[in-house]
Image: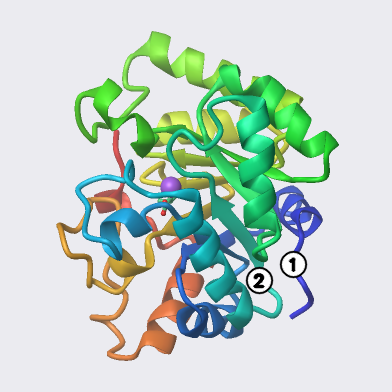
Amino acid sequence: MAKITTATLKKMKQQGEKITTITAYDASFAKLFDQAGIHAILIGDSLGMVLQGHDDTLPVSIDDMAYHTLCVSRGVENTLIIADMPFMSFATPEQAYVNATKLMQSGASMVKIEGGQWLESTIKGLVERGIPVCAHLGLTPQSVNVFGGFKVQGRDNEQALAMIANAKALEAAGAQLLVLECIPSSLGKAITDAVAIPTIGIGAGKDTDGQILVMHDALGISCSYMPKFSRNFLIDTGDIKKAIELYITEVSNGNFPGPEHIFK
Ligand code: KIV
Ligand code: NA
């Protein structure tokens, strides 16, 4: 497998090939996922929950993210490395430039930021300065206190239309990838059809251009609960490498997510 770039992912969308991504936080898992053929690895700020044991992602610092990005980058050869910008690390464009630089210099090839239209100037500025951006809409966990809990987003028509408008604005600002989290599958499809950049879903139905899972959920070892949209691939295989290969196969052939994993 050749080195994967944002251009590879865009071409995959155009050709209707599913993009398979997963989180990782260390070199060993990153290497295993890279060798299994995962297209992109996200160093998610989910590490606040699955590694650090917090109830949400808000306590994660930019130094935590930089440390785990360095660890992952040492295990990766071909996979695209995306690193999350943690809570309040991109509150202003200037803060975003300083903090995104730390992640890029730790081995990321792209940074991910949560939020809608208000990020237009931040995204434009990052891309102009050489930092590719993955946007993130829907249940953006850094806003859990605004949502009043981890709740499916975009359920009413007005919210859904606003999310489509946000997706278009983020694309126009220069975002090259878009994560969609916990939204009705019909909205996942509508946004995927409305933008030319690839969409990566988690609890967003089967019609997004790709899928992402938190590795602990995909392996059934999360310390809290198993989200409805996830599947334990280890239970069917009994081997971590085979579990990841099964995840890749099931996403590629359209079997995952199944009807039991989606929100209507
Ligand atoms: O932090 C994370 O792992 C994420 C994914 C769930 C998209 O943002
Ligand atoms: Na995240």
Tag 2: amino acid: Thr
Give percent across and percent down for residue 109: 71, 58
Mark 2–mark 1 contact, CB under 8 Å? Answer: yes
Tell me if mark 2 has few (under 14), some (14-19) or many (20+) residues whose alpha carbon lies within 10 angstroms of its own.
Answer: many
Q: Which mark is residue 4?
A: 1
Left or right: 162, with 74 as reference point: left
Residue at image x 58%, y 16%?
165
Residue at image x 40%, y 59%?
213
Looking at the picture, the colour scheme in use is rainbow
* Up-down relation of residue 141 to residue 237 (above or below): above
Give percent across and percent down for residue 171: 70, 29
Judge whether residue 18 can be spotted in this image: no
Tell me if mark 1 has few (under 14), some (14-19) or many (20+) residues whose alpha carbon lies within 10 angstroms of its own.
Answer: some
Residue at image x 41%, y 41%?
204
Which residue is denoted by mark 2 in the rendering?
79
Label 2 vs 1, first from the N-terminus: 1
Give percent across and percent down for residue 200: 54, 48
Give percent across and percent down for residue 196: 73, 36
Helix, strand or loop under label 2: loop
Residue furthest out toward the bottom: 239
